[in-house]
Amino acid sequence: MDFEIFKAALVKIEKLPLPGQTSQFKMSPPYREKLITLQKDKIKNAKKAAVMALFYPNIDDKAYLILILRKTYKGVHSAQVGFPGGKVEQEDGTLQKTALRETEEEIGVPIQSIQVLKQLTQIYIPPSNFYVHPFIGISTVTPQFIKQDSEVEALLEISVSDFLNENSLTTKTVSTKYDKKIDVPAYELNGHLVWGATAMMLSEVKDLIKEVL
């Protein structure tokens, strides 16, 4: 998809109401509600994080979205695909500033080159007890990505055309700490499986984009 055409459409999302949980739940793992019920006491003290769905033109002026593959480590989000972003720090001041700071730290895109278009619906992540606040941003120039080697295994540049293609939707059997094997709705993007909270946030992003295109 031509970036200029995409950009002209994307900026219109600022005035749209959020699809919210109706959109997110399309990609929800089947055990999610059970986990939230089990953690009703923990949720009261949930930490906050913010992430960025960043769109940009590639070198051929096609519209792209950047995702990251996290490092393999001893943690609940090991080796998973997600958005650039992270935990709120006291000095950030706002959730949007957290998303911008973390995006610059993890993928090297300067804060001043990102125009934030919209804050999306927050989502609770039971395994890590975080409320994540997603934002949609746009860079009008092709970024010179620099990944944060300590946290990011790889950068995944996703064509918007591929993301919007219904063929990217799938159902896969995955292993989790809660169920040894379970079928979950997912996106298959650039050969990677994207499921769980990231897929739920992507679902809201996708529904907003489809409304303005």
Image (cartoon, rainbow, N blue to C red):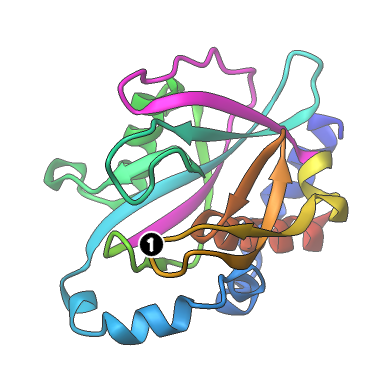
Q: 185 above or below 10?
A: below
The count of marks equals 1
Q: Give the structural element (helix, strand or loop) at label 1.
A: loop
Query: Left or right: where does residue 42 sit relative to residue 36?
Result: left
Q: Residue furthest left?
A: 90
In the rendered image, residue 88, in percent from the top left (x then y), is placed at 23, 48
Which residue is found at the position 72% from the left and 63% from the top? 207
Which residue is found at the position 27% from the left and 65% from the top? 129
Observer-nearest of 192 and 22: 192
Amino acid at circle 1: Lys
In the rendered image, residue 41, in percent from the top left (x then y), is placed at 18, 83
Query: Left or right: where does residue 152 sit relative to residue 45?
Result: right
Which residue is found at the position 42% from the left and 84% from the top? 34
**In the picture, which quadrant includes the N terminus?**
top right
In the rendered image, residue 201, in percent from the top left (x then y), is placed at 56, 59
Q: Is residue 197 visible?
A: yes
**In the picture, which quadrant includes the C terminus?**
bottom right
Q: 54 above or below 29?
A: above
Which residue is found at the position 64% from the left and 67% from the top? 183
**Residue under pointer 1:** 177
Instruction: Please give the range of residues in magenta.
Output: 131-160
Q: Is residue 119 visible?
A: no
- Does the stretch in magenta take in 50? no
Specify few, some or many for label 1: CA neighbours under 10 Å numbering under 14, 14-19, or 20 or more. Answer: few
Q: Residue furthest front?
A: 180
